[in-house]
Amino acid sequence: MDRHIQAPLKKEDIDSLKSGDYVYITGTIYVARDAAHKRMDDLLNKGQKLPIELQDNIIYYMGPSPAREGRPIGSAGPTTASRMDKYAPKLLDLGLRGMIGKGKRSAAVKEAIVRNGCVYFAAVGGAGAIISKAITSSEVVAYDDLGTEAIRKLNVVDFPCIVIIDKEGNDLYETAIEEYRQE
Amino acid sequence: MREIDASKITDAVKEMCIEANHYLTEDMKKALNNAAEEERSPLGKQVLCHLQDNLKIAAEDMIPICQDTGMAVMFVEIGQDVHVNGSLKDAINEGVRLGYTEGYLRKSVVRDPLDRVNTGDNTPAVIHYDIVQGDGLKLTLAPKGFGSENMSRVFMLKPADGEEGVKEAILTAVKDAGPNACPPMVVGVGIGGTFEKCALLAKKALTRSADSHSDIKWVADMESELLDKINKTGIGPGGLGGSTTALAVNIETYPTHIAGLPVAVNICCHVNRHSVREL
């Protein structure tokens, strides 16, 4: 089913999203990947405040290519989410509501998704040029020294993605494959 | 002795970096088009059409096909009758530096695997040299993204594992990779040699045309059989289920030791980029 939703996420939207839904997101989302997650985790371990507000927000796992003049961003497709599995459960427990990436998640992340009523979306891997067209602005909000790995705040309009793991813990990567398996 | 200026090599490498990251080769485009026509899953078909549109936008608006513009892997075939005026290695790295900075490509290389400070210009490249007869210089650039690189494997099989063991190893690597490697994939396989030789063969296999087959009959048969088997796993485009999981399986072989059967599986996503120049 095709759905249009707003970011930050609303509880009623998350409640109605089902694994396999094609979703277009409009609003504000954050971008962070490996190095930024490590820094945020270090801060939390020291009991310090994060540079971004997590409550009801979405983190997009992505590291863009540089923007050409007059454009908000370069190529901007998802990176493999499992590299953030070590850090994600803690962020979900602290209020993060959605993640966008690609690829499988660990059992611990799935449990945290169900425990907190969250959602994991996948964007199409290797489609960074077309995905960049859904991003209307990009601003570095922390860790500028990390270059492509800095934390960014994006404004997106009809950003295309697919619900992989819904709040019930249904996982499209497990169910969809069964349908087409011919072994 | 033929003389080649290092600056000519730098210019070529710069162009190759930009070209490979914005345009796929014809064989890859054809493979994607065929897949989009034949895919059985509606969602899978939608993903493949999305990828075709992505290629169009990348070329028209000069936006890299994928934001992971890769680590620059360069295969150099240099004739023994060629003399490079200057350093060949420095010339290649300077070309990568210029290509990635002036071409708006992502800098994805860190100077040390543990301290992880970005080098800021995507250097150094990973360079493989092969000295051949004659006075030619052939450069093959394959910018390699790490979503799929991370899912690649080396299996040190026993001779008794034989053909079935090899097939099982390849299927295991592909199934474990699943959605993480951005399917539909191209699967590069190296069989034989030593631990490092089979990995190098697998990488080189990825630079072969997606519609080509090995000249060795059993190898060509295995390529076809494995492509069929991989497409029956159900993984599908984006890992969202479907009949297109791989676009090609390319296998290279080499003699090996009486005690061994090394197999390397180097997985590449559908953005299987390469650019070739002969100087």
Image (cartoon, rainbow, N blue to C red):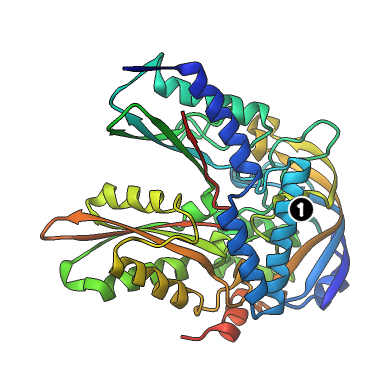
Apparent side of residue B99 relative to residue A183 in the rendered image (left or right) = right
Q: Nearer the viewer, residue A175 or A28?
A: A175
Q: Is residue B65 above or below residue B15?
A: below
Residue positioned 50% across, 78% down in the render: B233
Q: Nearer the viewer, residue B173 or B99?
A: B99
State the residue position of label 1: A130
Q: Is residue B106 above or below residue B251?
A: above
Secondary structure beneath dot 1 equals helix
Q: Position of residue A30 (x, y in %)?
A: 77, 49
Which quadrant would the N terminus of chain B be assigned to in this image?
Answer: top left
Q: Is residue B41 above or below residue A74?
A: below
Q: Name the quadrant containing residue A21.
A: bottom right
Q: What chain does mark 1 sit on?
A: A
Q: Is residue A51 visible?
A: no
Residue positioned 68% across, 43% down in the render: B64
Residue positioned 57% across, 28% down in the render: B14
Q: Name the quadrant containing residue B60.
A: top right
Apparent side of residue B211 relative to residue B166 in the rendered image (left or right) = right
Q: Position of residue A18 (x, y in %)?
A: 76, 78
Q: How many marks?
A: 1
Q: Position of residue A80 (x, y in %)?
A: 59, 56
Q: Is residue A102 visible?
A: yes
The residue type indicated by label 1 comes to Ile
